[in-house]
Amino acid sequence: MYLKNPKNERLRYSLLPRSNRQQGFVLILVLVLLSVLTLIGMSSMTSSSMELRATANAQQHQIAFNAVQAILEFSISKPTTNLINYQPDEAEKLIIQNIPAYTVASASSLTGTVEHTGYSVGVGSSLGLGKGFSYNFFNITGTGFNETTAGTKGSASSTQTQGVRFPAASC
C-alpha cells in the first residue's frame, strides 16, 4: 500500500510497527552467536580431555621413575646389608650382580644390576707416593614399570643408570 505525499512521491507504508520488522535479524544473530559459543565450548572440552590424559601419563611415568630411584638408592645406601659385593676380587669383577628383590608400592617388575667398571689408585701424599686411597667404580642400572589397578605391568617405564665410587680394600 502506497500513500502519496504533497510532493507526489510514493512512500512505502507497512501495517506492522518498525520494531517488529527487526525480529528476524535478531533471530539470525542469536543463532550465529549460539553456534560460535558451542564451537568454543567443544574445543575447550577437547583440550581439557587431552590435558587430563597427558597429566595421567606423566603421573604414571613419575611412579615408575620414583620406584627405580628407590631401588638405586637402596643399592647405594646400605652396601653392607644388601648382599651386593662392593669389594670384588679379580674373578668377581667380571660378574654382573643382581640387586636383591625390592618392592615399591604402585610399581612392578623392578630389577637392578651392579656392574664393576674399573678401579683407581690414588696418588697419595709426597711421602707415600702411590699409597693413596683406592676406589672401585660401579654402574648401577635399575628398570621398573608402573603397576595397573589389576596388578599387572603398566605402560610407563623407567631405566636409569648411576655411577658409584666405593673405597676399595685393595686393587
Image (cartoon, rainbow, N blue to C red):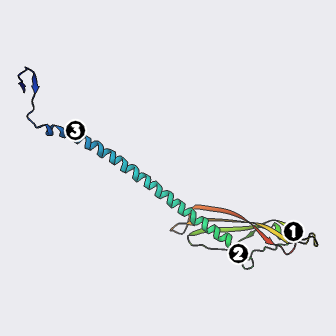
Q: Residue at x 64, y 71 (%)?
A: 70
Q: Quadrant of the N terminus?
A: top left
Is label 3 in a helix, a strand or a loop?
A: helix
User: Can you see residue 112?
Assistant: yes
Amino acid type of the residue that numbered disc 3 sits on in the rendered structure: Phe
Give the CA distance from mark 1 to mark 3. Answer: 90 Å
> Whole-percent x and y of residue 124?
89, 70
Question: Where is the C terminus found, in terms of image quarters?
Answer: bottom right
> Secondary structure under badge 1?
loop
Earlier-in-chain disc, 1 versus 3: 3
Which of the two residues, 18 or 122, is positioned nearer the viewer here?
Answer: 18
| 167 relative to 71 in the view: left or right | right
Name which residue type carries label 2: Ser
Q: Residue at x 53, y 59 (%)?
A: 57
Classify mark 1: residues with Cα within 10 Å, few (<14), some (14-19) or many (20+). few
The quarter of the displayed image where residue 144 is located:
bottom right
Horizontal and vertical percent position of residue 44: 40, 52
Query: Can residue 145 be seen in this snapshot?
Result: no
Left or right: where 14 falls relative to 54: left
> Mark 1, mark 2: which one is toward the viewer?
1
- Residue 56 placed where, x, y %? 50, 61
Q: Which mark is residue 122?
A: 1
User: Residue drawn at (42%, 52%), measured in percent from left and top?
Assistant: 46
Front one among 42 and 88: 42
Look at the numbered disc 2 and give the secondary structure of its residue.
Answer: helix
Say what amino acid the circle numbered 1 marks.
Gly
- Number of the front mark, 3 or 2: 3
The residue that disc 2 covers is 77
User: Which numbered disc, 1 or 2, marks the residue that appears first in the sequence?
Assistant: 2
1 and 3 marks in contact (CB < 8 Å)? no
Quickly name the residue at label 3. Answer: 25
